[in-house]
Structures are given as C-alpha cells and as structure tokens.
Image: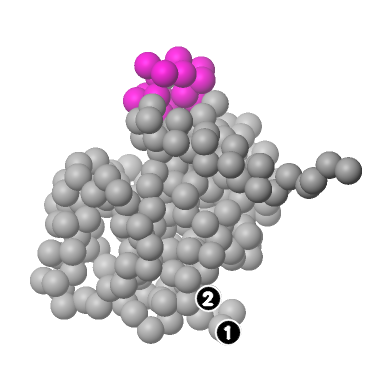
C-alpha cells in the first residue's frame, strides 16, 4: 500500500492518575492498582499498534496530565507523536482525531489489549475499499473505528458509555448510507472480571511464548 494511502492510527488515553483512571477496577485493585492497570493496558495497546503500523503514523492523544512522565516515556520508547485531547464528549474527541490527518484514519481505545496487530492491519487494509471499519466490542461499544474521511454526523448524539453505542452507530451508518465492515469482535477492560480475564490471557500468552528449558 503506498505510504500516502496508509491509515494513521490514533489512541485516546488518560494519564494513569490514582482515583481518576479505571475507577471501576478500584474495588478489586485499589486506586493505585487501578492506575497501574491502566498504565499496563496502555503500554500493551501501544505496543500492539506499533507492531501493526509504523510509529511515525501513530498519535497518542493525552488527557488529565499532558506532561505525565508515562506519556513522555512512551513517546521516547516508541517514537510516536503526542497531542492533547480537546474538550467535549467522546464523539467530539474521536472526530478531532479523524480531522487531524488527511486520508484514512483509525481511532482506537487504550483499554482494548485484545485488539491484536493482525486485527489493526486487517482494518487498515479494509479501509482501502470501504468507507468505515469497526471492531465491535462484546459490551455493545467498539474498540476501534476507522474512516476514509472525517464524518462528524457519525459521532453526534451517540449514547457513549452504554451498551447501545454500536447499535445506534449502525443505525446512523444506514441513515448516512455509509458502507461499513466489522472484521472481528473484541473485548475491553472496564470491570474487575475483565481485568482477571486479561491477566489469564496474558499469562497464557507468556506460557505459549516461553522457551522450553533444556
């Protein structure tokens, strides 16, 4: 795929500040533990992204503390760009990402470690011939959305944070007569059971890639 047609990828992330990130994990992990979980999830999602797409085409959009040491560390480690998230609801922030760069653009959450590099590459490839690509989440939302051009109407008056996000988005796609594909279903980490699921998944992955002992 020619460089000018390769999608850019944008991740939305809060700084890992105790009591302000992953608050639904606090009953299981405590405030500090939930912030640490957020840090681990962001690092995993960014690592997956950088395996799929050149780092110079990836932007991390920051919130809460734009100068947080973690953001600076990730920028130096991966070679990505940093930009502050604008004000507004999730739809306004997604649309800001889509308007930031010309050509096809993908926006991904920072709490979806189940989005593999292969999935990201598949979404990028499908954007070459479809107007919208979405990775639906098991909870009724989605973990990644990509569009060929900016589409403000697609993100207006969506019930963000509810199980109806995807169904309302699909209705909007129909109303706008937009073609969309849904390559895979993913899951994100919001609740204690999600974190435990991710821990089991990560441990199984370590076992799979562990070198056999002599």
Q: x%, y% of residue 107?
A: 41, 58
Q: Can residue 156 be seen in this snapshot?
A: no
Report whether 199 appears left or right of 153: right
Instruction: Give the Cα distance between marks 1 and 2.
Output: 7 Å
Residue placed most toward the observer, 20 or 191:
191
**Who's the residue at 73% across and 45% down the image?**
210
Residue placed most toward the observer, 44 or 98:
44
**Who's the residue at 35% across and 57% down the image?**
185
61 in the magenta segment: no
- Residue 20 found in image quarter: top left
Compared with 137, 27 (above or below) is: above
Q: Main secondary structure of the magenta part?
A: helix
For numbered disc 1, what is the local secondary structure?
A: loop
Are dots 1 and 2 in contact, CB under 8 Å?
A: yes
Identify residue for label 2.
6
33 in the magenta segment: yes
For numbered disc 2, what is the local secondary structure?
A: loop
Q: x%, y% of residue 98?
A: 38, 63
Q: x%, y% of residue 143?
A: 37, 52
Compared with 170, 34 (above or below) is: above
Q: What is the span of residues highlighted in magenta in the rendered image? A: 20-35
């Amino acid at each position: 795929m020619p460089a000018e047609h390769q999608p850019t990828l944008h991740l939305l992330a809060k700084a890992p500040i105790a009591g302000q990130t992953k608050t639904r994990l606090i009953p299981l992990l405590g405030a500090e533990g939930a912030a640490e979980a957020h840090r681990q999830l962001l690092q995993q999602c960014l690592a997956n992204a950088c395996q799929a797409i050149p780092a110079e085409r990836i932007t991390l959009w920051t919130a809460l503390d734009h100068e947080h040491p973690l953001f600076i560390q990730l920028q130096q480690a991966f070679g990505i760009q940093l930009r502050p998230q604008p004000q507004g609801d999730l739809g306004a922030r997604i649309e800001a990402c889509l308007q930031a760069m010309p050509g096809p653009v993908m926006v991904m959450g920072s709490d979806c470690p189940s989005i593999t590099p292969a999935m990201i590459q598949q979404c990028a490839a499908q954007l070459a011939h479809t107007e919208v690509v979405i990775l639906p989440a098991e909870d009724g939302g989605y973990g990644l959305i990509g569009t060929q051009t900016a589409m403000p109407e697609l993100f207006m008056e969506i019930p963000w944070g509810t199980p109806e996000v995807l169904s309302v988005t699909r209705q909007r796609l129909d109303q706008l007569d937009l073609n969309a594909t849904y390559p895979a279903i993913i899951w994100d980490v919001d609740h204690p059971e999600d974190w435990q699921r991710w821990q089991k998944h990560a441990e199984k992955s370590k076992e799979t890639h562990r070198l056999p002992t002599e």
